[in-house]
Image: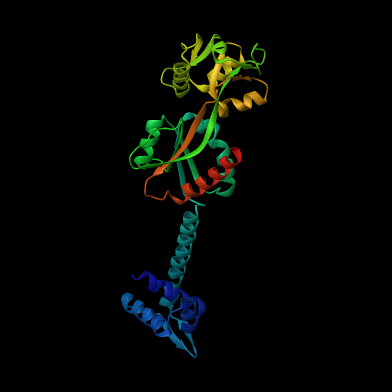
């Protein structure tokens, strides 16, 4: 059955006029008549009977008109849904992210995004950098947000979102809390060390090599940033963390920053998309939101 013919017949039946149907559809009257005639021939039933200057639906025409109205309503529903999808207001947003942006950057951006696009279903996968990029490449994510800069990978484009500061933090009652110290002096303090392979530990190792010092003594080794912050706040030692991770605790007075002379480290947070391919509309909308938000943060 010709679906467009059903739509044409719906307008004829709803308006009671071939002329009016032609105006609504912006086609000629003979074209409308041809569609109705072809529909009648296809189903083998008479659909219209003459009625003065207008038309009269036969019993078969009345029955077909009810079905045609449903098809027309479905067509409108499909178009509304696709319009919302194309505008980024509906659909699904799948984000693959490493722990830092997943826990300390993206949630705030998603608040603004959800206010603008409440119908979009959002899913965040917290993965290591390599797995997050693989998820993006294999279409299991629409974008990837990587803390620490990530890697260059064929088929993916990188865009710097922001460069987060790396801080040394201690308990508020620590003797160096809120003070400025020489790097070598601070390295004599016990440290809360992250697990081998973590980005924070690797950056601290790199800093020690650059400064020509040994790795500081570990008062405690923990797996995860929350554990590192809690241990530092309890007074167990110095923690080396992202400012995004620590700034709220510092603002609440649970931790204090120690500024280090001659050390200004930055932790790049990078957005990845598939090269030469526009992200889905919902992801494009989110990228616009996050770019505006990070401009304010910088």
In the rendered image, which quarter contains the N terminus? Answer: bottom left
In x, y percent, where is residue 73? 48, 65
- Count of numbered badges drawn on the protein: 0
Using the rendered view, name the quadrant where residue 114 is placed.
top right
Residue 6 lies left or right of residue 20; in this view the side is: left
Residue 243, placed above or below residue 14:
above
Residue at image coords 52%, 22% = 225
Residue 73, placed above or below residue 219:
below
Residue at image coords 57%, 45% = 292
Depth check, front residue: 147 or 7 = 147
Residue at image coords 60%, 38% = 297
Using the rendered view, name the quadrant where residue 185 is placed.
top right
**Residue furthest bottom in the image:** 52
In x, y percent, where is residue 198? 44, 22
Work out whether residue 120 can be spotted: no
In the rendered image, which quarter contains the C terminus? Answer: top right
Residue at image coords 43%, 84% = 29
Work out whether residue 159 can be spotted: yes
In x, y percent, where is residue 83? 48, 59
In x, y percent, where is residue 222? 49, 15
The type of colouring in the image is: rainbow
Depth check, front residue: 79 or 239 = 239
């Amino acid at each position: 059955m010709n679906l467009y013919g059903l739509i044409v017949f719906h307008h004829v039946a709803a308006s009671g006029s071939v002329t009016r149907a032609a105006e609504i559809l912006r086609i000629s009257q003979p074209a409308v008549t041809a569609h109705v005639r072809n529909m009648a021939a296809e189903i083998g039933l008479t659909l219209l009977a003459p009625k003065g200057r207008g038309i009269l639906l036969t019993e078969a025409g009345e029955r077909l008109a009810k079905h045609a109205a449903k098809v027309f309503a479905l067509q409108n529903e499909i178009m509304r849904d696709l319009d919302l999808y194309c505008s980024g207001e509906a659909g699904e947003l799948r984000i693959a992210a490493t722990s830092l942006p997943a826990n300390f950057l993206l949630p705030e951006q998603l608040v603004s995004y959800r206010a603008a696009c409440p119908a979009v279903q959002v899913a965040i996968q917290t993965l290591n950098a390599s797995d997050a990029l693989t998820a993006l490449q294999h279409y299991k994510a629409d974008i990837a947000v990587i803390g620490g800069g990530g890697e260059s990978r064929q088929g993916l484009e990188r865009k710097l979102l922001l460069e987060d500061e790396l801080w040394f933090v201690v308990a508020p009652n620590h003797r160096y809390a809120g003070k400025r110290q020489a790097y070598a002096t601070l390295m004599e303090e016990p440290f809360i060390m992250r697990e081998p392979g973590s980005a924070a530990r690797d950056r601290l190792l790199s800093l020690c090599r650059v400064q020509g010092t040994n790795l500081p003594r570990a008062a405690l080794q923990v797996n995860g940033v929350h554990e590192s912050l809690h241990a530092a706040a309890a007074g167990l030692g110095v923690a080396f963390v992202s400012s995004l991770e620590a700034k709220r605790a510092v603002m609440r007075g649970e931790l204090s920053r120690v500024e280090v002379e001659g050390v200004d480290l930055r932790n790049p947070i990078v957005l990845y998309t598939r090269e030469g391919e526009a992200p889905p509309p919902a992801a494009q909308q989110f990228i616009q939101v996050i770019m505006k938000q990070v401009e304010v943060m910088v």
